[in-house]
Image (cartoon, coloured by chain):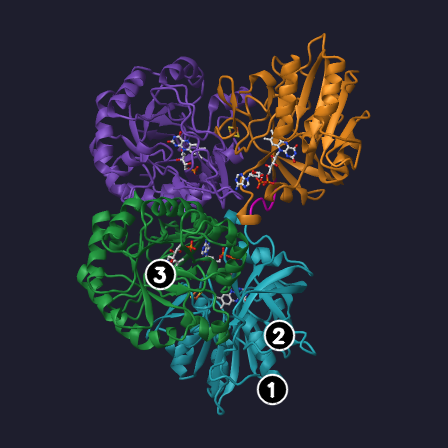
Chain colours: A orange, B cyan, C green, D purple
Amino acid sequence: MSVAAEPRTLAPPERRIAEVKRVERIGAYDLIVARDPVGPADPQPGQFYMLASGERWGGGDRERPYLPRAFSFARVRRLPGGQGVDLSFLLEDVGPGTQRLGELAAGESLMLLGPLGVGFARPSQDRRPLLVGGGIGVAPILCWDDELRADGVEAAVLLGFRSAGHAAAAALFGGAPDVSTDDGSAGRRALVTEPLRAELERDPHATVYACGPEPMLDAVRGLCANLGVPAQLALEAGMACGYGACFGCVVATVDGYARVCVDGPVFAGEALA
Amino acid sequence: MSVAAEPRTLAPPERRIAEVKRVERIGAYDLIVARDPVGPADPQPGQFYMLASGERWGGGDRERPYLPRAFSFARVRRLPGGQGVDLSFLLEDVGPGTQRLGELAAGESLMLLGPLGVGFARPSQDRRPLLVGGGIGVAPILCWDDELRADGVEAAVLLGFRSAGHAAAAALFGGAPDVSTDDGSAGRRALVTEPLRAELERDPHATVYACGPEPMLDAVRGLCANLGVPAQLALEAGMACGYGACFGCVVATVDGYARVCVDGPVFAGEALA
Amino acid sequence: MSEIDLCGVGLRGPILNGSGTFDAIAARRAFGDLLLDRFPFDCFVSKTITLQPREGNPPPRLWETASGLVNSIGLPNKGVRRFLELDLPLLAELPVPLCVSVMGFSHEELARLVEEIEALDEISLIELNLSCPNVETGTLVGADPEETAAALTAARASTDKPLIAKLSPSATDPAAVAAAAELAGADAISLINTLKGMPLHPTTREPWLGGRTGGLSGPAVRVVALEQVASVAARVDVPVIGMGGISCGRDAADLLAAGASAVAVGTENFRDPAAGRRIAAELAAFEQKVPAK
Amino acid sequence: MSEIDLCGVGLRGPILNGSGTFDAIAARRAFGDLLLDRFPFDCFVSKTITLQPREGNPPPRLWETASGLVNSIGLPNKGVRRFLELDLPLLAELPVPLCVSVMGFSHEELARLVEEIEALDEISLIELNLSCPNVETGTLVGADPEETAAALTAARASTDKPLIAKLSPSATDPAAVAAAAELAGADAISLINTLKGMPLHPTTREPWLGGRTGGLSGPAVRVVALEQVASVAARVDVPVIGMGGISCGRDAADLLAAGASAVAVGTENFRDPAAGRRIAAELAAFEQKVPAK
Ligand SMILES: Cc1cc2nc3c(=O)[nH]c(=O)nc-3n(C[C@H](O)[C@H](O)[C@H](O)COP(=O)(O)OP(=O)(O)OC[C@H]3O[C@@H](n4cnc5c(N)ncnc54)[C@H](O)[C@@H]3O)c2cc1C
Ligand SMILES: Cc1cc2nc3c(=O)[nH]c(=O)nc-3n(C[C@H](O)[C@H](O)[C@H](O)COP(=O)(O)OP(=O)(O)OC[C@H]3O[C@@H](n4cnc5c(N)ncnc54)[C@H](O)[C@@H]3O)c2cc1C
Ligand SMILES: Cc1cc2nc3c(=O)[nH]c(=O)nc-3n(C[C@H](O)[C@H](O)[C@H](O)COP(=O)(O)O)c2cc1C
Ligand SMILES: Cc1cc2nc3c(=O)[nH]c(=O)nc-3n(C[C@H](O)[C@H](O)[C@H](O)COP(=O)(O)O)c2cc1C
Ligand code: FES
Ligand code: FES
């Protein structure tokens, strides 16, 4: 991978067309695999893309979607001989945009801009990476785990889901991630923060990488702060542009509002207000 | 058929869902056959329906279509035992609405309101019906011819088209209509008004029923006026509602503007200004 | 649906039609008496009537835009005399109270219009269209507090019927205009009317509409209506009738939550003559959440 | 594309960005120097700068509506001093002329703002944002001829740079405001800014936006922009910069046909950072039809 000062791979300065190769149902989620012919081969885990369907983007519920939607890439496969890369996205249908994208079929076109934002940074020598994903937040955790494994690092991966249907996504991981569910229908019945606490109390020499719903991230942040463990949190926010143009996606940080799309989506726990 | 004072069959006062049974390409046009389960079995030739696709109406070119679109029914088939009627519509793709409707597939739903407006009125005893259709304007001429035939009346049918591709629609007629094309690629190379003039000069005891592009209707109107032959013209106008609500579809008549959707679409030639 | 009181007139529900977006007489020609059994509104508002007959604007009168419609109808109507003679008897047969919308091009004209209908029991409410963007004075009056107050005063003097002032969305401060109308005797405020717009012909690039400019309505104006209704409702004590972009019960619930006491369905009627009934049903699902005003 | 002259500043084409809809510095972080080779606009307009730094409104700041966007950003910016110190050097590296948008909350403040930038050669044009719907005084000034004239006078006294007056679409008569701005020394008029709107939370029905109300933009406002641009262009002699709902070359051609001398792309940038370039290419196809003003 390119060793950037900050883990940010630059994006071509225009929206481009990718071809949908596969759409698969993974439990409660949709997995979309699209071929990006011209984009960079080394998006950084934690970076994201703005997506829209090539056709019929609009005309959905209440005449939406209108703007593109942000999605972390969940997996990247580099194709031989500059044929580009296959990007995987893991989607949860929560509204007109995700619904429309879930309706895409192989061969159809996907509008794509990216990779965008700053991804996860490597842990310092003395710390092991500890990956935590909640719900659809497993997406960036998956490609981060892929990349660490490619470098021979076997990180502990702790995943939390509502129930077994959502937990199906755990099967995408290379290793054997630790799974918790709210209802105990798969893995342990617990919040993912419980195994995380145990892990960190066992050995605090870790850097925590987390993505998931706000309450989970808040808990992870508090836990890490108390134990003095550095945390890198991948945030979400409503976005219009994804590249810093609209100032719409702000989150409160210790030095004022920051744009999740250009200053994040990955933030250090202690940077957040 | 119900013998109404004016040829107007009433419509149920709400939009309803019809199931698309068949979509067929007829030369340059699309033929959509939809099953109307609850609508009246006796729409009057010349009456029309407001149509929209059940899904993805909107989100097309420039975020259109938004409003429903008006279409004469081209054929009606009554199903046994109150199963409703199969309505045929003949469409020419001229923009986002007709394009979307042309994309409908069997099994999909078609939103429908109608029948609307006033249809063609029977000729007086001493006159024979003479049917004239130009381009997509053949639609109401087709069902009018069907109905006259069902009553044992063989009317002369004169059709005009741009070229052979469009003339394919002539094959839908029960008899053997007289065909003219602008480029002579099918039938006679002529404007449909030429055979009409010949027909009327041969025997002026006719009532002319015409639908087609504005220049053709103007020519037909002028011709009939000169020869003192009554003409019933089925007009088009941009519409929003189709049932008299918006006052948007007006045409100039001898006593001011009239709404094509409720006072027409069929007007007597001499009524138009 | 629970019965509501609008300026002393009892309605079976909170859903009106926007003036000029439903012609009950034409609809009855198309749908027959079934229309009366399934009447889509709880109160019927007539198209705007003027003292003299009007032909309206030359066609084309309609332009479809992104999530909306631009119209330049130009207030065609029979004129008040023939309206009362020919239309009123038919409108009196509707199963709901009748509101007549009127526009006067001068205070005298407005006063005379109102006098013409004052005595008629078939008419429960009068709406003053101060805001039709297709007739120049309309915009000016409804956008200006003084002008609006003067118009209300002229009308108020000639009737005891409830007067609804329909504002112009072109007002820089709709709440100020509403307050002026209230002070001058308006019994209710209705808004929004259409936003001024001008589509061009796809090829000639000349104005498409026969009236050159027209009024924008439909989902495109939804959030604008919500903002204006909220600011007006916060300022006046009289009930507010909210409209603009309603296409489902959720939109109606939003306007009621923003402070409206009743709502009117406009352009959505063009997509389905039964829209009012559908929206009423959808709204019922939201009602418990709606603050009664 | 043919070179155009905007208030004495030569542009390689007629396409600007709407202020606040493209951050060239952030975009360069995301896209690198390729952005400079493929810069989407012929003139870059900065986000509106104020005298003091501003945090902007609390989130959420965005709402997607039918064919449009409602935003309540609230003019976050570093304040003019730090803008000049930190941002200007980077903006000076752009391959196109720079226009700085400013807003003052008083005439003194506006005058001081303009003085701060007057001397800087990197800045070719100054746009006065008289119309931001998220800051109360904004709406008032740009909607009122006298207020607008006063603001122009204050700014005019402190600079010889071309001054663009960006009006508020809430003006009842935009042409009158534009004429007042021209008389008071505006070298160009730009419009439209966003229309005031207020979306509600889907479940709580409280205002969704942190700033309660926001501004509507995108295709939903297209026909409104066309009407206002046409009426302003018909009234003033100075060039008009048209914007509002441009999503393709045809929309740009429409605004130029309506009398604009240049156009600005706003919300469409959010759908594609290269929108400006695409629209320029599409516009080229229409150009012969466009009347040069
Ligand atoms: C950096 C980043 C990475 C992401 N990665 C992923 C991922 O890998 N997989 C994934 O499934 N999702 C991901 N998301 C979330 C995803 O972008 C959203 O789920 C998506 O935008 C929802 O769009 P929608 O139209 O389906 O739903 P929406 O209708 O947009 O609803 C989504 C939420 O937005 C709000 N909302 C509702 N209506 C509106 C409106 N009209 N305007 C504005 N907001 C509204 C509500 O809070 C609602 O819960 C990511 C988000 C970010 C910022
Ligand atoms: C009573 C009646 C019966 C009809 N019967 C048939 C039929 O049987 N078969 C058939 O194919 N057609 C029929 N039509 C015509 C049909 O309704 C139109 O072709 C259709 O509405 C076009 O919609 P569209 O979205 O495809 O095209 P549009 O984009 O609506 O373009 C159609 C025409 O409308 C104008 N236009 C362009 N843009 C706009 C805009 N934004 N807003 C308003 N107008 C615009 C232009 O003049 C254009 O040529 C009938 C019309 C009427 C009134
Ligand atoms: C075709 C059409 C005609 C209208 N005619 C009138 C009218 O005569 N008088 C009036 O006060 N408002 C008139 N209006 C405005 C509507 O009553 C309503 O205020 C506006 O359309 C906003 O509501 P909507 O978005 O639901 O359509 C008309 C609107 C349309 C679309
Ligand atoms: C997110 C956002 C932020 C904006 N910020 C500003 C601003 O700071 N100053 C300004 O004058 N206009 C601002 N505008 C208005 C735009 O410059 C433009 O006038 C308006 O969006 C209409 O154009 P559009 O429909 O193409 O977006 C903003 C618009 C948006 C959508
Ligand atoms: S999404 Fe536009 S600035 Fe972040
Ligand atoms: S289409 Fe609305 S009145 Fe005819």
C266 relative to A92 in the view: left or right: left
Residue with the most extreme top position? A126
Q: Chain of mark 1?
A: B
Q: Residue at x 29, y 18 (%)?
A: D118
Q: Is residue D287 visible?
A: no
Quick check: do tags 3 and 1 share a chain?
A: no
Which residue has dot 1 on it?
B151
Magenta stretch?
A: A53-58
Q: CA distance from mark 2 to mark 1?
A: 15 Å
- Judge: label 2 CB < 8 Å from ligand 2: no
- The numbered mark, 2 or 1, whose residue comes first in the sequence reads 2
On screen, residue A240 above or below C3? above
- Judge: label 3 CB < 8 Å from ligand 3: yes
Q: The residue under label 2 is which amino acid type?
A: Val
Task: Tell me the crowding category of disc 3: few under 14, some 14 to 19, or many 20 or more residues within 10 angstroms, Cα based.
Answer: many
Which residue has dot 2 on it?
B76
Q: Residue at x 48, y 92 (%)?
A: B126
Q: CA distance from mark 2 to mark 3?
A: 34 Å
* Image spot of residue D253 (x, y percent): 41, 42
Q: Residue at x 39, y 60 (%)?
A: C5
Regarding mark 3 in the picture, which secondary structure is present there?
Answer: loop
Tag 2–tag 3 contact (CB < 8 Å): no
Q: The residue under label 3 is which amino acid type?
A: Ile
Q: Quadrant of ligand 1?
A: top right
Q: Nearer the viewer, mark 3 or mark 1?
A: 3
Q: Is residue D293 visible?
A: yes
**B157, B240: nearer the viewer:** B240
Quarter-of-image position of residue C241: bottom left
Q: Which mark is residue C73?
A: 3
Quick check: do tags 2 and 1 share a chain?
A: yes
Quarter-of-image position of residue A201: top right
